[in-house]
Image (cartoon, rainbow, N blue to C red):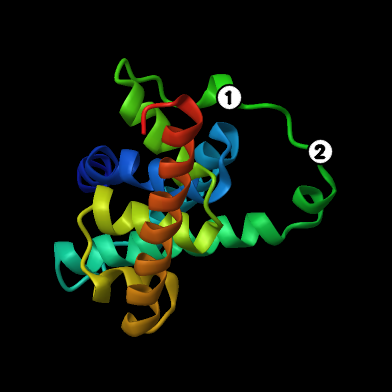
Amino acid sequence: MTDETFERVARTYGDMLYRVAYHALKNRADAEDVAKTVLHKLYQQGDRFESEEHRKHWLLRVAVNESRRLLRSFWRSRAVPLDEQWDAPVSDDPAKRELFQAVMGLETKYRLTIYLYYYEGCSVKEVAAALHANPSTVQTWLQRARERLRRELAEEEEGKGYV
């Protein structure tokens, strides 16, 4: 892989890798580390991809695997999380901010499924490949995640007195 090709790929997919890792890990520093690790593995891999779509799927799969590896690490299980409320993306729209917080409150498998499907525009089959799951399992996760988000957002609306 030439340096120019690597730079193009890094510019094209770097943000996506970071966002996937952030949704899995809920931590900016860890997400940056995962994105850098994935890009390093890409550089080592070379240009052995059949197509650009194959490269994207490979990058997504490696990002998910690296995030899972980090979640299972000894240090991660022994660390006490700091409040990262300030670390979340800022939006002027309260509805978007509320939805983001609700999505980040989901379990990892639901959070990643929602993110890849809705934000990255991956198909159910692509999400299944990235998460090492069956497409029917991904459809179930999407359904459950949507229901949990619906329920949580409805409870918040009732708590605010809007309903």
Front residue of 124/32: it is 124
81 vs 78, left or right, is left
Q: Residue furthest top?
A: 92
Question: Crowdedness of circle 2 by 10 Å Cα count: few (<14), some, many (20+)?
Answer: few
Instruction: Please tell me the numbered disc located at residue 80.
Output: 2
Query: Which quarter of the picture shows residue 158?
Result: top left
Looking at the rendered structure, the secondary structure element under dot 1 is helix
Q: Tell me if residue 58 comes above or below residue 96 in the rendering.
A: below
Picture quarter with the C terminus: top left
The percent position of residue 86, horizontal first and vertical second, equals: 56, 19
Residue that mark 1 sits on? 85
Q: Tell me if residue 61 comes above or below residue 89 in the rendering.
A: below
- Give the residue at x 33% y 38%: 15
Front residue of 137/98: it is 98
- Residue 1: tell me if it is visible: no
Q: Amino acid at mark 2?
A: Val
Q: Amino acid at mark 1?
A: Gln
The number of numbered badges drawn on the structure is 2
The percent position of residue 78, horizontal first and vertical second, equals: 85, 48
93 vs 156, left or right, is left
Mark toward the start of the polypeptide (1 vs 2): 2
- Give the residue at x 50% y 43%: 104
Looking at the rendered structure, the secondary structure element under dot 2 is loop
Query: Which quarter of the picture shows residue 95?
Result: top left
Q: Residue furthest left?
A: 51
- Give the residue at x 81% y 38%: 80
